[in-house]
Image (tube, rainbow, N blue to C red):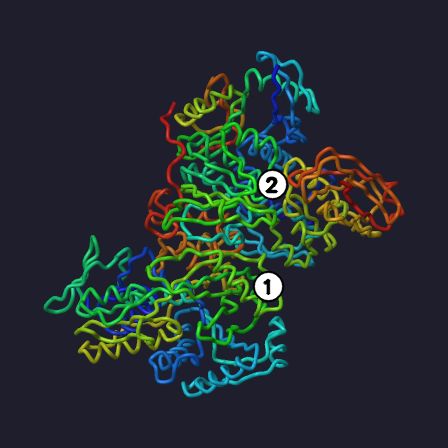
Amino acid sequence: MRDLVIIGGGPAGMSAAIAARESGIQDILILERDGQLGGILQQCIHNGFGLHMFGEELTGPEYAWKYEKKVNELGIEYKLNTMVLDITEDKVITATNSNDGVFQIKAKAIILAMGCRERSKGALNIAGTRPAGIYSAGTAQKYVNTFGYLPGKNVVILGSGDIGLIMARRMTLEGSKVHAVCEIMSYSGGLARNIEQCLNDFNIPLRLEHTVVEIHGKDRLEGVTIAKVDQNRKPILDTREYIPCDTLLLSVGLIPENELSKNANIKLSNITNGAVVDQDRQTSVGGIFACGNVLHVHDLVDFVSKEAEIAGKAAAEYIKSGKKQSFVIPIKTDGKIRYTVPQIITEAKDVTVYFRVSDVYKNAKIIITDGDKAILSKSKAKLAPGEMEKIMLKTEQIKNVKELHFSLEV
Amino acid sequence: MIERKLTCIVCPLGCELAVTLEENRVLEVRGNTCKRGEAYAQNECTNPKRTVTSTVMCEDGGLVSVKTDEPIPKEKIFECMEIINATTARLPIKIGDVIIKNACGSNIVATQNRSK
Amino acid sequence: MYDIAIIGAGIIGGMTARALSKYNLKICILERENDVAMGATKANSAIVHAGFDAKEGSLKARLNVQGSKMMPTICKELGVKYKNNGSLVIGFDNEDRDTLNELLKRGIKNGVEGLRIIGKQELKQIEPNLSNDVLCALYAPTGAIICPYDLTIAAIGNAMDNGAELKRNFAVESIDETSNGYTIKSLNDSVEARFVINCAGIYSDKIAKLIGDNSFDVHARRGEYILLDKECGDMVAHTIFRTPTKMGKGILVSPTVDGNLLLGPTSVDIIEKENKATTQDGINEVIKKAKENLSALPLAKTITSFCGLRAVGSIGDFIINSPKKHFINAAGIESPGLSASPAIAEYIVELLSKQGLKLVENQNYNPIRTSSHTFFEASIEEKNQMIKKNSAYGRIVCRCEGITEGEIIDAIHRNPGARDLDGIKRRTRAQMGRCQGGFCGVYITEILSRELEISFEKVTKFGGQSVINVAKTKGGTPQ
């Protein structure tokens, strides 16, 4: 029996472990599937991490190192190259690695920090052939940054998520020509700074309201046909345009990896694809917490670390006192606000609610109500789906509330 | 007088800046939400600079991730890449080790630890 | 000099090679691609048909029923998954019901066991997710599902374990008669054999023409499919066919042996031999028809879409004959070719024997091949024993499907060894899950490079020019 087992040794897992240790839990074990701690940060060699947490611009490996050092200093135990195969509702973890073989651990509390995966090409059903040369942006990132190989010379990128934008610059710097970044929406899901420094700096065109409609090539990709889309995101046939290229990178969204959570019967949100959690990031299964990209996809690692601290502290409380949820205030959204994390509040204390909107809104007002009663409102000049927002609720605002309703007045 | 629109890249907020210029002299910066935004606009209009990140090959054939210690002039990015690509680094390497001295006005430093 | 040269390493070539490897014969399989099972075998409906479709008295009907009866034993010997899930041909109106009755009669004549028509009520009980518009169905309890490339890989692997040889990237250019057989040439290789068996799928007419046999043509029929996530695999228990019309058997919905849900195929005849591009129209048609069959279709769970090419002969039946001494055609093997394949192989052996091939039993013949999924299916205790012996079994490479480095290394070194990423996928299922190789493709490239002792840039997706990487990013001189 272990006190706390953390699944995943990326930024979320490490931050949660440190927070739990600092809250007095000695017996902590991190299970990491990779050969080193740090998760996806190890291949994110670009800068831009850490402004919130450390007040400086760090690269991914540098950001990871700050936490890895702390994990080592605190003597927190971890197992590398270890894959968790199963978690049960009563917190039995089955995992495997080369040294221990397949083994089981029972834990008092578990923190899920498995991160997310990229949406694959298959889900898009793009017509055409199935040649080599089509990769998710993160896969290309791994080839280029970790292994030192260039997947191709002439590149088209579908989707303008941040990884796609970052890879446009990385491939350009390493000697490829990026011909276009196509985005089916009328706005990019990536950060404005990345459009500036990854595309504009290198004169890479961002083709908004465009998508790839056909893939060409027998063995290796030879080109793609792109087309403009109408308001319903359907391609307009006479705008078809052929771009010769040997590489297509996809940056079409990230999906929290919750296969293990499903095994443990944890209630998932069909909007975030992550667990439904309370203000402590506790899931529907008592003693199992979730944080980072496995809970909902973040745009900044700094927010991942912060969220993981909340989960780490709460897991420590749970282990020490078996903390129970005393009441449940559900947080509802109006659709313009797509989702909130947490989705429920179970304790009267100050709570920061994170949320995302479903479209670009200008001069909007965030309104929080309980039935007819106004709780809080806040004006924002600009809201975009790619940027996570947060709002703080004070203890007294939560007290005696039955339900919180988040809406957007545009 | 000319107006120039910029997207600030100093932090993830990505403020949209409007800069009023006269003969390459910045008269006014609007749209920024912090001091650093103003400084960015100043530099961007007179001497734009970027941090370059990449990898350097190590003597064992593996890679180590690197960055320019300080931003370098934007037009020197590819020159800097050529220097980076022509270099092989000795092992072991600790984060912060200088891998290349003075490439386009900045040291190239390791952003990863690499053992021998 | 080989006794037998088999042209084509698909299911027919594979089954034939295995059937012949029981005897003391020197066998060579010639395959134009970088791997086996790359043609029609790779992308079809993966069904072992009960045998009520083919016209009574046809070769198709006889070999289908016979082959599907042989299939469970063969799969057991070869360690290949076979699931006798039964099939349903669903009807929406009275006209369909009449057709189903015809099929029932035909099936009984063909010797299919257990066939019966069932009504809406029973249907809803056994398949609650079927559309409410379905009226009745023909139930065939002997229908089954199988993985066609797994079966082919296993059959060829077993034949190779028993002495057969495989030559890859051998595209036959010419076949010349010699005093005691044939010389078969590719652009840069040549093979001599006493007997030649043409199992070249959509190219089997071209191969026949090389020896002057112009008696038939084969054209490709495109079939587009959509594969859904394992979460959807239990939406139906049986293989659900539509009542056939003049236009063909229609779009089916079926679980696969690995637990995914398969939708398709479309049916479009083409003149050129190669066109495996999916089309928007095709995908839309599959979606539309599949939606008619089911009450709800979770398309968001799509993993991939693909197009297969079926080899359709100009005769209307399988073309299994000997146009010339010591030369056998097995051509136009369209559906139910997979189901019939064990029987086709036996039939070919018979034809060869009639032509004077001496069949002396190979005393060392071993019909058994352990499953490619032995580790995957082992108990925790067994797994730990295997990990102790070989720590590579402890390292999971493909997280979606839970495939270890040990299994990937096995796939590379076991007959017929995987040479590329797709070869690993078909043997182990690594890269076949939700992320479609997004995470593990990189590591599998690394393992292939190491095990095959080829450079990283030489690793391909499926042979030829299908390289994964084109250059190294770095390469400087020491400072």
Q: Quadrant of residue A397?
A: top right
Residue ID for mark 1:
C297
Of C388 and C448, nearer the camera is: C448
Q: Position of residue A101 (x, y in %)?
A: 52, 55
**What amino acid is labelled 2 in the image?**
Ser
Give the SS element for disc 2.
Answer: loop
Chain that bears disc 2 = A
In the rendered image, which quarter contains the C terminus of chain C?
top left
Of B76 and A408, nearer the camera is: A408
Q: Quadrant of residue C122?
A: bottom right
**What amino acid is labelled 1 in the image?**
Leu
Q: Are marks 1 and 2 in contact (CB under 8 Å)?
A: no
Residue A176 visible in the snapshot: yes
Q: Between label 1 and label 2, give the one nearer the viewer.
A: 2
Give the SS element for disc 1.
Answer: loop
Residue at 55% across / 34% down in the picture?
A61
Residue at 65% across / 27% down in the picture?
B16
Residue at 48% across / 43% down in the picture?
A249
Q: Position of residue C425 (x, y in %)?
A: 43, 56
Chain that bears disc 1 = C
Labels 1 and 2 positioned on one and the same chain: no
Q: Position of residue A72 (x, y in %)?
A: 61, 36
Question: Tag 2: Cα neighbours inside 10 Å, few (<14), some, or many (≥20)?
Answer: some
Q: Position of residue C13 (x, y in %)?
A: 30, 68
Gap in Å between the C-alphas at discs 1 and 2?
Answer: 29 Å
Instruction: Locate residue C269 relative to residue A83 in the image: left or right.
Output: left
Of A141 and A264, nearer the camera is: A141
Residue ID for mark 2:
A186
Q: Judge whether C134 appears above or below B70 on screen.
A: below
Residue A315 visible in the snapshot: no
Q: Judge whether B19 appears above or below A115 on screen.
A: above
